Image (cartoon, rainbow, N blue to C red):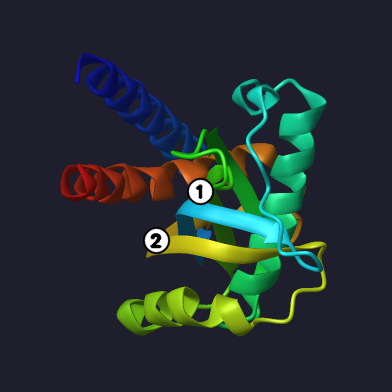
Amino acid sequence: MFKMRIINLVNISTVLLLINLLQTKSQGQSGQRVTVLTVSIYRAQLSDKMTGVPVLWNGDYENPETSAFKKLAAESCDTFREYVKSEIPKGSVDGLCTRHIFQQPGSVESGVSISLRLSFMYMNEIKPDYAELGSYLRDKFAHFQFTSSHKITEASFGVCEADVEIPGEDKDAIDGSKWKIIAIIALVTLAIVVFGGFIYIFVK
């Protein structure tokens, strides 16, 4: 419980700092509003597309600096991005993949438990039906034809959206400005922290 409180305090402090950065950068400038759609994936498992063998636990998955962690992070991002993009509204900037967490399964036969977050930016406002989109994401992956080397065998999805204003002088250089991407994700994180809190309470 104490550990969870510390993590939440760090997350909230980081969010507040980055929101302040966005506000400071935006002062005195006319901006353009964009929509960020965030899909959180948790309690997920991947398996080999051809053999069906799950991705088994490796102690190196606890260390983000290991080659094994980086390899699984890239593979899981590719697999989930491909699937999620097939269901969300068209016209987004490619999904930014963050917050990779790999956990040891409950049994030796089970695959590693995967959590991550995908964020998609739209230049135009979108108003998806979140309940319907979440239902589609949960129900369709079993029959999806993946082009990557893995397929999804288990997954839960959470969907949320945030409207963010980008300073006017940067309209033509969105992809080249790191602070804007960080600030956008910070705003979305605020919603995810609350959403994740509810998930934690109910799951526990």
Q: Position of residue 185 (x, y in %)?
A: 50, 46
Say above or below: 93 vs 17: below
Percent across and percent down for residue 11 are 36, 28
Distance Cα–Cα, label 1 vs label 2: 9 Å
Tell me which amino acid carries mark 2.
Answer: Ala
Q: Looking at the image, which residue is at 75% across and 74% down?
A: 146
Tag 1 and tag 2, C-beta contact below 8 Å? yes
Label 1, secondary structure: give it: helix
Residue 75 appears in the rendering: yes
Mark 1 is on which residue type? Ile
Nearest the viewer among 156 and 48 is 48
In the picture, measured across the screen, residue 147 lies left or right of residue 170, that is: right
* Mark closest to the chain's N terminus, 1 or 2: 2
Dot 1: few (<14), some (14–19), or many (≥20) neighbours within 10 Å? many
Q: Residue at x 57, y 46 (%)?
A: 109
Q: Position of residue 191 (x, y in %)?
A: 31, 50
Return the residue at label 2.
162
Q: Residues within 10 Å of mark 2 (few under 14, many from 20)?
A: some
22 up-or-down from 17: above or below: below
Q: Is residue 63 above or below residue 153?
A: above
Question: Residue 173 lies in what quarter of the image?
Answer: bottom right
At 44% from the left and 38% from the top, the residue drawn is 106
The residue lying toward the viewer, choosing from 171 and 6, is 6
**Quick one: SS at disc 2?**
strand
Give the residue number, with chain letter if any, for mark 1: 184
Q: Quadrant of the C terminus?
A: top left
